């Protein structure tokens, strides 16, 4: 590999930042023109990009935390990403369809959880099960325990490998410590990593070394809503920064007078959430940074599971992460390792009155080690090579004594080529080798140890061409192939007992194949100075091969045992879609409107009496979202409206699964914020405002909700 002598230096960009005092113009809020800024700083565009790249991530989301997003946002005049390629880019310049939600927009929304924030993005579908739990889908294919979305916080995965889904209330992040959220659509495994099948949500918090942030918040409201959180960054000298945060939330699912006994039985207990985290970053030398992170969370909530069944789930998680970044003669090297632990307990409260005990609990562990290197091969060509190892395991249930899971080895390579001043091409590929394993004191039933001696080889790719024919126009052509690997619950044999031939066994399926998702997309964006905004249009086609799910597909005789398999490959699906968006700001008024059209065609095969999925009817064909905001000094308002066409989804309770219709409906959210002083502000927000009860999904109707929030800057 040819490596030029123009190696990125971590301290180059830091020196530029330290010299800001020589240029008082840089402090002006009106300094938004990057060209003028570079002229003042006497640097060329290429030198600026290289200097900035030296102080930030190597390009994978796992390195995003060491980048000074605040300075880059000031330079570009808008939120900037480095997650896809390692270089600072506007969302329109990224080689993947991306939307960036900044901290200011998050604050104005009045949202108290991440799904509420994501719901504002075109192409995002949020299924709200209750006040504490939701599922987030990207361009359809949403379901209980949705396993198609990669969710990261500063590069550490927070989706749960147990079934590959995200329990959003377990994410140990407070709203006030989020700098920005990046939403990437379509399969992005070669650029972003493991399990990036339908898209990526990359949550980036304030940097403990570069950012000075502190806030205490208290929220109270209807349904006995109570929440408190605290975030504070500390500087230990000039070279070490620490950020600590903690939060607690309690809420009743519904108000007492408004529900019949059957619905309240599903929501007997209060929903609660507890989280705490510490994040640190140190500049050890001009060329080396090191960071450490520890988190903990506990959540108890109502939800809808993988079989579209009502359940109550208790999650307890903790994680540790260490990371080192270094500028060397071989480029910018990043090494990280983290471990996630999950205690999982699920029960079916609807069965309690029958005397039937239907619950299970288990533990799962994930360890991920990553090594990456970003090298500038020429002034116009950058490459990134990455290695990754992960070990996913879970304990057997209800009888302990066995552990099953898989180990995954991956290598990826990305090339980012600036073909000309108006054309940029990015190509990335990734190869994964997955090896199943099982260890235990007893033989698995109905499968044998030989069934778990299985290896799977898969490859994924991403390619993106960005063409800017004019300074205000951008055309993006992208394609990607992503791999959704079988999850631990789908693979494992949990009901391990001394079963005799003739006994019915419920088991995971070590023979299930990965899901392959391929996407093709053309997007266009134009800046509209007349309205102070942008217009976007995207057309895409997606194909899903070997879709897998929990379907309880009837009896099969395996090694002499009648068996019900928890997971099977059900068939293929395809989808055409369109997204159109228009946003603007004139004087004190902000506004935006988007329309998403999706046409899903499934080709699935189910056994009689099973719990099927039906994305043709459960995916809204049309979704319209709009927002209107007003800012006037200390007062800001934000109105958000969403309308979905009718859907039908299966719901399993005590009766056989039936299609439940969710009628077309308009829902509204409103937020009003008043800044009393520079340090103290008050907020009032409401959700589901148009009706006392609104059918949002197959879960019981959502109630109108009103919340008041006090924020004190620390």
Image: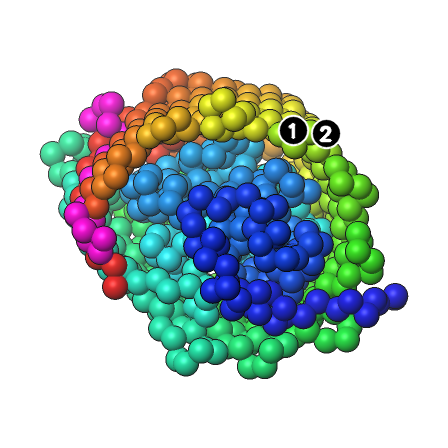
Q: Is residue 690 magenta?
A: yes
Residue 170, by quadrant, is bottom left
Give the x, y percent position of residue 595.
50, 22
**Which of 571/624 is in front?**
624
Give the x, y percent position of residue 205.
44, 58
On-image quarter of the C terminus: bottom left
Q: Is residue 102 visible?
A: yes
Residue on which disc 1 sits = 473
Q: Residue drawn 71% across and 51% down?
A: 190
Task: Please determine whether, in this image, residue 518 is positioned above or below residue 275.
Answer: above
Q: Could you tell me how far apart the alpha carbons at marks 1 and 2 are, in whole angstroms?
A: 6 Å
Residue 467, by quadrant, is top right
Residue on which disc 2 sits = 469
Coloring basis for residues: rainbow
Residue 178, by quadrant, is bottom left
Q: Residue drawn 53% across and 66% down?
A: 19
């Amino acid at each position: 590999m040819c490596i030029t002598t123009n190696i990125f230096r971590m301290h180059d960009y830091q020196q530029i930042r330290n010299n800001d005092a020589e240029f008082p113009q840089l402090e002006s809020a009106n300094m938004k023109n990057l060209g003028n800024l570079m002229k003042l700083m006497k640097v060329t565009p290429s030198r600026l990009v290289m200097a900035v790249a030296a102080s930030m991530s190597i390009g994978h989301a796992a390195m995003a935390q060491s980048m000074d997003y605040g300075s880059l946002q000031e330079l570009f005049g808008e939120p900037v990403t480095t997650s896809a390629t390692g270089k600072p880019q506007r969302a329109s310049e990224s080689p993947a369809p991306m939307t960036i939600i900044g901290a200011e927009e998050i604050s104005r929304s009045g949202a108290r959880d991440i799904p509420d924030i994501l719901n504002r993005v075109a192409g995002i579908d949020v299924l709200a099960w209750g006040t504490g739990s939701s599922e987030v889908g990207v361009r359809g294919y949403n379901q209980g325990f949705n396993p198609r979305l990669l969710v990261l916080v500063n590069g550490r995965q927070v989706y749960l490998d147990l079934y590959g889904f995200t329990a959003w209330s377990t994410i140990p992040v407070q709203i006030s410590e989020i700098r920005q959220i990046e939403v990437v659509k379509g399969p992005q495994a070669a650029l972003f990593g493991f399990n990036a099948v339908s898209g990526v949500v990359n949550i980036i918090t304030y940097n403990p070394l570069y950012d000075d942030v502190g806030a205490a918040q208290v929220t109270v409201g209807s349904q006995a809503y109570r929440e408190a959180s605290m975030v504070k960054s500390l500087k230990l000298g000039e070279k070490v920064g620490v950020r600590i945060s903690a939060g607690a939330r309690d809420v009743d699912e519904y108000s007492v007078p408004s529900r019949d006994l059957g619905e309240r039985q599903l929501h007997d207990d209060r929903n609660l959430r507890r989280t705490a985290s510490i994040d640190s970053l140190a500049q050890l030398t001009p060329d080396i940074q090191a960071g450490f992170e520890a988190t903990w969370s506990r959540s108890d909530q109502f939800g809808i599971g993988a079989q579209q069944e009502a359940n109550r789930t208790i999650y307890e998680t903790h994680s540790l992460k260490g990371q080192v970044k270094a500028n060397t003669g071989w480029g910018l090297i990043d090494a990280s390792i983290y471990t996630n632990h999950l205690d999982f307990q699920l029960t079916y409260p609807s069965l309690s009155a029958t005397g039937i005990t239907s619950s299970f609990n288990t533990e799962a562990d994930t360890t991920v080690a990553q090594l990456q290197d970003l090298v500038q091969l020429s002034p116009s060509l950058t490459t990134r090579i990455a290695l990754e190892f992960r070990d996913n395991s879970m304990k057997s249930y209800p009888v302990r004594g066995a552990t099953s899971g898989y180990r995954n080895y991956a290598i990826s390579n990305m090339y980012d080529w600036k073909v000309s001043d108006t054309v940029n091409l990015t190509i990335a590929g990734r190869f994964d080798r997955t090896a199943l394993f099982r260890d235990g004191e007893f033989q698995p039933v109905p499968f044998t140890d030989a069934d778990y001696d299985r290896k799977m080889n898969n490859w994924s790719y991403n390619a993106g061409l960005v063409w800017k024919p004019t300074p205000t126009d951008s055309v993006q052509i992208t394609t990607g192939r992503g791999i959704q690997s079988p999850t631990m619950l789908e693979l494992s044999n949990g009901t391990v007992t001394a079963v005799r031939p003739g006994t019915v066994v419920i088991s995971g399926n070590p023979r299930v194949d990965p899901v392959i998702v391929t996407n093709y997309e053309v997007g266009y964006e134009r800046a509209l100075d007349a309205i102070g905004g942008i217009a976007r249009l995207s057309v895409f086609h997606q194909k899903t091969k070997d879709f897998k799910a929990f379907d309880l597909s009837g009896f099969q005789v395996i090694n002499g045992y009648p068996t019900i398999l928890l997971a099977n490959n059900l068939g293929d699906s395809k989808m055409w879609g369109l997204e159109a968006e228009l946003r603007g700001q004139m004087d004190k008024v902000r506004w935006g409107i988007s329309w998403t059209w999706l046409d899903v065609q499934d080709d699935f095969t189910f056994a009689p009496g099973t719990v099927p999925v039906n994305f043709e009817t459960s995916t809204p064909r049309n979704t319209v979202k709009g927002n209107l905001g007003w800012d006037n000094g200390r007062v800001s308002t934000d109105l958000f409206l969403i309308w979905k066409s009718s859907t039908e989804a299966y719901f399993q309770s005590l009766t056989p699964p039936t299609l439940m219709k969710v009628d077309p409906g308009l829902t509204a959210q409103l937020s009003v914020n008043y800044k009393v002083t520079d340090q103290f502000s008050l907020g009032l927000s409401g959700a589901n405002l148009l009706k006392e009860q609104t059918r949002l999904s197959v879960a019981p109707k959502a109630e109108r909700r009103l919340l008041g929030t006090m924020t004190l800057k620390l």
